[in-house]
Amino acid sequence: MAIISETPVSGVKWDFDGRQYETDLVTFIDSHALIIEAKSQRVSKSALRGAPDRIKRHLKEILVEPSIQSYRFQQKLEKLKLNVQSDKDLIAKLPIDFSNIHKFIRVSVSLEDFASLQSNLHLFEQTGWLPDDFIPCPTMNLADFETLFDFLEHPVQIIHYLQRRTELEGDIRFIGDELDFMGLYITTLLNVGDITTDDQSEIIITDMSAPLDKYYMSRDQGIIIEKPKPKISQLFKEIFHKLEERSTARWTEIGTILNRFSPADQLKLVKYLKTLKKIVEKKWKQEGHKNTTIYNPPASSEYALSFVLYKNENAKDRDKFIGHASNIGLEPDHVKYCIIIAKNIDMDDSPYHFIALAEPSNDNPNNEHATDKP
């Protein structure tokens, strides 16, 4: 069963290194824990005009301290996952089984917009105002936070967006605000290729928010136009909905990994699957016939995808096909997770007939988790 907290827990008090803290909000969706810190400090006019002392003060209050606190709470929960006896009082406050939590996401929400500086923390790198061990998380104002949950209607997309924003926060230099990031998500799902931390170039994404600006401005004026949506293939949409419908354990992890494949890669996969289907229909009787496609990720990615097609007549060999696909997908040293999807091409009742999240292990190289067989 997937773990979904229908009522988020607010005002959670906890101890860390002998001091007591309070987390504003934590909610659990399947195997993800979402930690939210909210700050109501107002940004002074002098800070917006560029007064260094005020900017430094607001940076600490609105961007740095909430992120540090949410990271402390993440560390607390990670420790709790390893040993649930370490804090029975905190366990009693949280309505979940911690053995099923595998991913943590942090986000800070501010009452006001800090001149878009919260989306461009790299601008402070040379000031010395950021702690050396500072691990940032996405910070957005309340209006943008509400827009995110209105714009992205599926939980998997919201989780994936926040996950990618966290990863990009410390890796790549962007120039733009949070709505620009959302606009970039429409066309790329925040898949920016092989740009790495060593690349000091800046990516200017200003004006990427244009589709969202047009939609919300039109709605405010009573004009109804189609809401912009991320460019996700129909196949992937159907897989997401089936996973959620069946509440497959760790379905959000499977969904977020699938979202890591860019819209262009998704279209290539769908197109190739049509070709592969024809091959399977013609050659399924042949030993060793081609019925698998493997997405080999670049060295910068730890995720792979294996897709297997079979027919009613050779369904008895499905597990063998899946094992082979899993082996190949997990073969590269940099791959830590592989999604294996199998589909019976003679049946149209489901977008998949087997799906699993596999991780390599010393004892079992095909260590599968979150398996679903509708």
Image (spheres, rainbow, N blue to C red):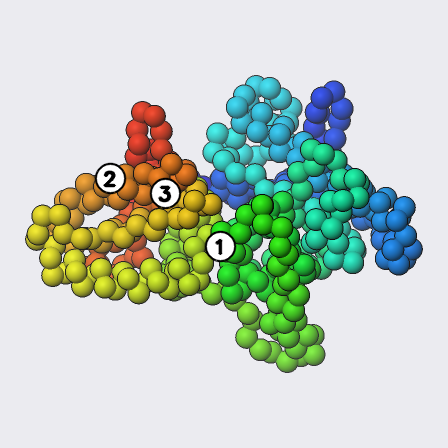
Q: What residue type is labelled 2?
A: Gly
Q: Is residue 56 above or below residue 114?
A: above
Task: Report helix, strand or loop for mark 3.
Answer: strand
Q: Residue at x 71, y 49 (%)?
A: 121
Q: Is residue 369 visible?
A: no
Mark 1 packing: few (<14 Cα in 10 Å), some, or many (20+)? few
Residue at 39 percent across and 40 percent down: it is: 335
Rendered view: 333 above or below 197: above
| Residue at figure coordinates x 38%, y 36% from the top left | 333
Q: Name the residue under label 3.
A: 338
- The image shows residue 346 at horizontal and vertical percentages of 18, 59
Along the line of sight, the residue nearer the viewer: 316 or 162? 162
Mark 2 lies on a secondary structure that is helix
Numbered tag placed on residue 193 in the rendering: 1
Q: Nearer the viewer, mark 3 or mark 1?
A: 1
Amino acid carrying label 1: it is: Gly
Mark with earlier residue (3, 2): 2
Q: Where is residue 192 in the image (x, y as percent from the top left)?
A: 52, 56
Residue topped by disc 2: 323
Contact check, label 3 and label 2, Cβ < 8 Å:
no
The three-letter code of the residue at mark 3 reads: Cys
